[in-house]
Image (spheres, rainbow, N blue to C red):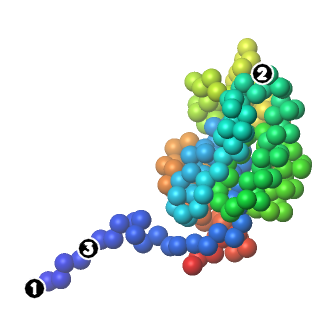
C-alpha cells in the first residue's frame, strides 16, 4: 500500500522570525504602506501601527479635517510626536503618511530606532490607486494628477534615503509584496532574524 502524502499549506511551512527593530513603511500615498504593512505584521505576529490612524484617534478628527482646521505645519509637528512615541512603545510594523519621511527629524529618528522600507511605485500606479479617493487632503486641487506628479518629483529624492527599497508595481498580490519585504529585511540581521 502506498503512503499518502499530504501537501503542507504554504502558511504552515513559513519560517518564524524575531523582530529586533520596528519596520517603518514609507512612500507615496497609494504605495500600499498600510495594506502591505498590515499583512507583514500579521505574518510576523507583531503589532501593526499606523501613524495617521493614531493622529486621527488622538485628535478625534480625520487627517483632512486636521489639515483644514490647523494646517499642514501643525499636522507635521503632531506626526513627528506620534512617530517618536510609536517607535519607543513597542516593536512592530509602522505605516506612516506619505509626507512623514520628508522631515529630516523623522528620517533620523526612524533610522536610529527602526528601519525604513520605501515601497517604490511609479507615478501611474499611484495615480490609479488614489484618483477615486477623497481622503487625500493634498490632492484637493483643481488638477490632482499634476499635484501628485509634483509631490512625487519632490519626494522621491528623500524616499531614496530609506534603508531598504521594495518595488510595488501595482499588480503584485499583497502576500507576494510581504515576501519581497521579508527578502530585503533578511539582509538586515540587526532588524530581523530567523528563529
Residue at the image position 73 percent from the left and 59 percent from the top = 89
Which residue position holds label 2? 68
Q: How far across and how far down the image is residue 41, in percent?
A: 57, 58
- The reply to whether residue 158 is visible in this rendering is no
Nearest the camera: 95 or 156? 95
Q: Which mark is residue 1?
A: 1
Q: How far across and how far down the image is residue 182, in percent?
A: 60, 64
**Quarter where residue 13 is shown:** bottom left
Q: Do labels 3 and 1 touch, CB within 8 Å?
A: no
Circle 3 SS class: loop
Looking at the rendered image, the disc whose residue lies closer to the viewer, 3 or 2, is: 2
Rounded to the nearest angstrom, the CA distance separating label 3 from label 2 is 58 Å
Circle 2 SS class: helix
Q: Residue furthest right?
A: 104
Q: How far across and how far down the image is residue 138, in percent?
A: 75, 26
Q: Specify which label sits upstream in the sequence, 1 or 2.
A: 1
Q: Specify which label sits upstream in the sequence, 3 or 2.
A: 3
**Quarter where residue 102 is shown:** top right
Q: How far across and how far down the image is residue 180, in percent?
A: 58, 59
Rounded to the nearest angstrom, the CA distance separating label 3 from label 1 is 16 Å
Looking at the rendered image, the disc whose residue lies closer to the viewer, 1 or 2, is: 2
Rounded to the nearest angstrom, the CA distance separating label 1 from label 2 is 73 Å
Q: Specify which label sits upstream in the sequence, 3 or 1.
A: 1
Residue 45 vertical placement versus 119 (above, below) = below
Circle 1 SS class: loop
Quadrant including the N terminus: bottom left
Which residue position holds label 3? 6
- Left or right, 14 with reference to 23: left
Amino acid at each position: 500500500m502506498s503512503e499518502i502524502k499530504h501537501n503542507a499549506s504554504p502558511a504552515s511551512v513559513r519560517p518564524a522570525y524575531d523582530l529586533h527593530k520596528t519596520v517603518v513603511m514609507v512612500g507615496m500615498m497609494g504605495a500600499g504602506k498600510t495594506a502591505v504593512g498590515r499583512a507583514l505584521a500579521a505574518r510576523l505576529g507583531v503589532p501593526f501601527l499606523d501613524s495617521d490612524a493614531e493622529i486621527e484617534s488622538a485628535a478625534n478628527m480625520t487627517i483632512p479635517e486636521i489639515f483644514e482646521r490647523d494646517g499642514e505645519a501643525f499636522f507635521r509637528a503632531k506626526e513627528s510626536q506620534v512617530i517618536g512615541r510609536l517607535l519607543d512603545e513597542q516593536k512592530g510594523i509602522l505605516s506612516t503618511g506619505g509626507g512623514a519621511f520628508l522631515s529630516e527629524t523623522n528620517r533620523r529618528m526612524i533610522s536610529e530606532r527602526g528601519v525604513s522600507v520605501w515601497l517604490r511605485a511609479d507615478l501611474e500606479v499611484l495615480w490609479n490607486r488614489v484618483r477615486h479617493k477623497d481622503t487625500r487632503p493634498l490632492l484637493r486641487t483643481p488638477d490632482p494628477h499634476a499635484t501628485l506628479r509634483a509631490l512625487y518629483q519632490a519626494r522621491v529624492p528623500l524616499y531614496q534615503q530609506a534603508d531598504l527599497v521594495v518595488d510595488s508595481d501595482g499588480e503584485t498580490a499583497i502576500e507576494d509584496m510581504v515576501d519581497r519585504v521579508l527578502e530585503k529585511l533578511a539582509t538586515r540581521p540587526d532588524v530581523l532574524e530567523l528563529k
